[in-house]
């Protein structure tokens, strides 16, 4: 009984936010036009995408680094892409953080690694986005904005970083999202681990891959990068890694290859 009351209250509260903080129609249409991969779904899913985008905007705090100004256009562009992976899973998967820090362009981060002999190596890494345990999520607007032009390359920094957020919900970035049971985890790994090993062999052999070779970096990057391809260039993933495509379609409860609106 209490559960039903809480669900009803939550629904009422969310409906009120969606009415009072509605995304203007012109801005929503502009966002869909700029990122066409958002539209590859049913009318019902598109309505849910808009609702979740509004709720995401109401729960998260955007800030601009080094004077970068966050406009409504920027906040909606990020939010609409961020909620794509959880469209049929729910916003609770993004409950671990509030802040989203936007930079105008990629940033250089100072990194340090210690090799097997204990020698410290310092280097700079160019970051177009970064997700950390407990947040915030960092994104480069230059890269977020380019998503519409780069979808045929399978590139999408927003989806990439938010899939890392999903991966970390169970406390560890191990390329496995939160799943209901040990059997489900084992089933996940039985698809992803051999696919990752096979992909690394292809990358090491210098073969051209339709998925970004960065996916060979680690198993958690493989999950994030194949998810990018799944959402923005689904045919490529379906053709080259059909088992990974089916696994992701099952997990995200979406099947972008079969959308009628493409
Ligand atoms: Zn990554």
Image (spheres, rainbow, N blue to C red):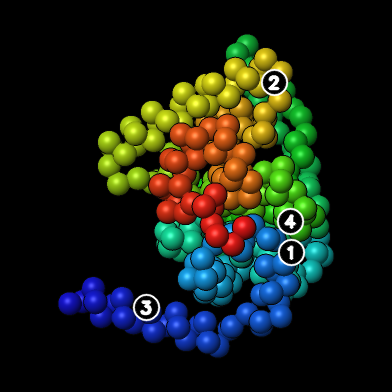
Q: Closer to the camera: disc 3 or disc 2?
A: 2
Residue 52: x %, y % from top left: 51, 70
State the residue in front, 121 or 22: 22
- The residue at the point 50 percent across, 40 percent down is 245
Q: Is residue 33 visible?
A: yes
- The residue at the point 66 percent across, 82 percent down is 25
In terms of image quadrants, where is residue 99?
bottom right
3D distance between C-alphas at marks 4 and 3: 34 Å
Q: Which mark is residue 34?
A: 1
The residue where tag 3 is placed is 10
3D distance between C-alphas at marks 4 and 2: 26 Å
- The residue at the point 67 percent across, 15 percent down is 205
State the residue in front, 52 or 258: 258
Q: Earlier in the sequence, mark 4 or mark 2?
A: 4
Q: Is residue 141 visible?
A: no
In terms of image quadrants, where is residue 177?
top left
Q: Residues within 10 Å of mark 4 (few under 14, many from 20)?
A: many
The quadrant of the image that shows the C terminus is bottom right
Secondary structure type for disc 2: loop
| Residues at discs 3 and 1 in contact (Cβ within 8 Å) | no
| Residues at discs 4 and 1 in contact (Cβ within 8 Å) | yes
| Residues at discs 1 and 2 in contact (Cβ within 8 Å) | no
The residue where tag 4 is placed is 148
The residue where tag 2 is placed is 207
State the residue in front, 199 or 170: 199
User: Looking at the image, which residue sits at the far left?
Assistant: 1
Quick check: 256 above or below 200? below
Residue 256: x %, y % from top left: 54, 52
Secondary structure type for disc 1: helix
- The residue at the point 63 percent across, 80 percent down is 23
Q: Earlier in the sequence, mark 4 or mark 1?
A: 1
Q: Closer to the camera: disc 4 or disc 3?
A: 4
């Amino acid at each position: 009984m209490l559960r039903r009351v809480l669900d009803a209250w939550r629904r009422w509260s969310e409906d009120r936010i969606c009415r009072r903080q509605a995304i203007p129609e012109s801005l929503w249409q502009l966002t869909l036009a700029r990122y066409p991969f958002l539209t590859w779904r049913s009318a019902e899913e598109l309505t849910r995408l808009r609702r979740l985008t509004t709720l995401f905007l109401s729960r998260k705090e955007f800030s601009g680094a080094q004077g970068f100004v966050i406009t409504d256009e920027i906040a909606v562009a990020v939010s609409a892409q961020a909620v794509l992976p959880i469209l049929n899973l729910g916003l609770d998967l993004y409950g671990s953080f509030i802040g989203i820090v936007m930079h105008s362009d990629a940033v250089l981060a100072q990194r340090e690694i210690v090799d097997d002999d204990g020698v410290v190596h310092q280097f700079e890494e160019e970051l177009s986005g970064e997700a950390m345990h407990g947040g915030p999520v960092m994104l480069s607007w230059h890269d977020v904005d380019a998503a519409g032009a780069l979808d045929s390359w399978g590139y999408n920094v927003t989806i990439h970083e938010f899939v890392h957020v999903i991966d970390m919900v169970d406390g560890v970035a191990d390329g496995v999202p939160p799943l209901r049971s040990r059997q489900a985890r084992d089933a996940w790994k039985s698809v992803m681990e051999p696919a990752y090993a096979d992909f690394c062999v292809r990358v090491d052999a210098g073969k051209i891959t339709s998925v970004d070779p960065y996916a060979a970096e680690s198993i958690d990057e493989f999950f994030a990068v194949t998810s990018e391809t799944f959402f923005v260039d689904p045919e490529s993933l379906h053709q080259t890694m059909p088992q990974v495509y089916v696994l992701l379609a099952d997990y995200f409860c979406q099947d972008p290859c079969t959308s009628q609106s493409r």
